[in-house]
Image: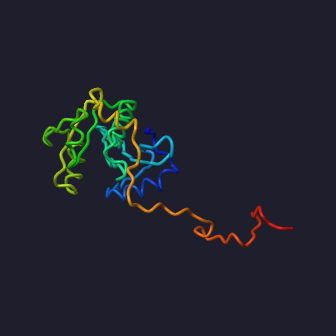
Amino acid sequence: MYVRDAKNRDEAWLLDALEDVGLDDAAFRSRDYVIALDEESNEKAGFGRFRVHKGDESFCEITCVGVLEHWRGQGVGAHVIERVVDRAVAEGYDTVYSFSSAYRYCVQFGFDAIDASALPDTVRSRFEQVKSKDADAIAVRLDAEEFTMPERLRDRFKVASPKSGDEEAEPELTAEDFGFDEETPTKYSTNLRR
């Protein structure tokens, strides 16, 4: 498994994955995302967003972290968060915020809950936006240099593999799915008889 920055070609998958895990990203930009992939199959397992809020008091946020169901419990989400924190450091941010009702997950990496009244004004404004949609959301903050990865999650990630399930395999796409009839020759056909 590894985590890389999303590419333009990942956009359709990201939008589908966000919908599958029930996340809404009204300000979607694929270049803000990182994606976890299986090295052998190149199957995408999870994703997360590094969101920068520009203004007088610029700050960054980890948002839209999701792991596909058959990859959960294997450290994928932890490594997505680690990659987002690395991006924050690379872009000069010392502090990373997140706002979610799933804040307990972040605590294991060094995030601390912070009272909304202690947030800078621009950060508090963003938190209030999130809170209006997720009443149980809590603000957490991380000093980016203090990120810690629990060893158990690092070990799980090294050997991660999709959990088998009763899921039906996605059907292979054919030319007909794209409106082409393979029997009718076109000027681009390679199997034309002369």
Question: Could you tell me which residue is drawn at 80 percent across and 66 percent down?
Answer: 192
Give the quarter of the figure containing the N terminus.
top left
- Most foreground residue, 68 or 11: 68
Residue 157 in percent (x, y) is at 37, 38
Residue 61 versus residue 41: which sits nearer the camera? 41
Q: In this view, does 154 lie to the left or right of 129?
A: right
Residue 194, position in %: x, y? Answer: 86, 68
Decide if residue 140 is on the left or right side of residue 79. Answer: left
Q: Which residue is at 31% across, 36% downward? A: 153
Q: Which residue is drawn at 34% across and 53% down?
A: 69
Which quadrant of the structure image shows residue 184?
bottom right
In this view, 172 is above or below 55 = below
Number of marks drawn: 0
Q: Is residue 27 above or below residue 35?
A: below
Question: How far across and how far down the image is residue 37, in percent?
Answer: 45, 44
Q: Where is residue 136 in the image (x, y as percent from the top left)?
A: 16, 52
Residue that extends furthest to the top in the rendered view of this protein: 145
Tell me, what colour scheme is on the image? rainbow
Quadrant of the image occupied by residue 97: top left
Q: Which residue is drawn at 46% across and 43% down?
A: 38
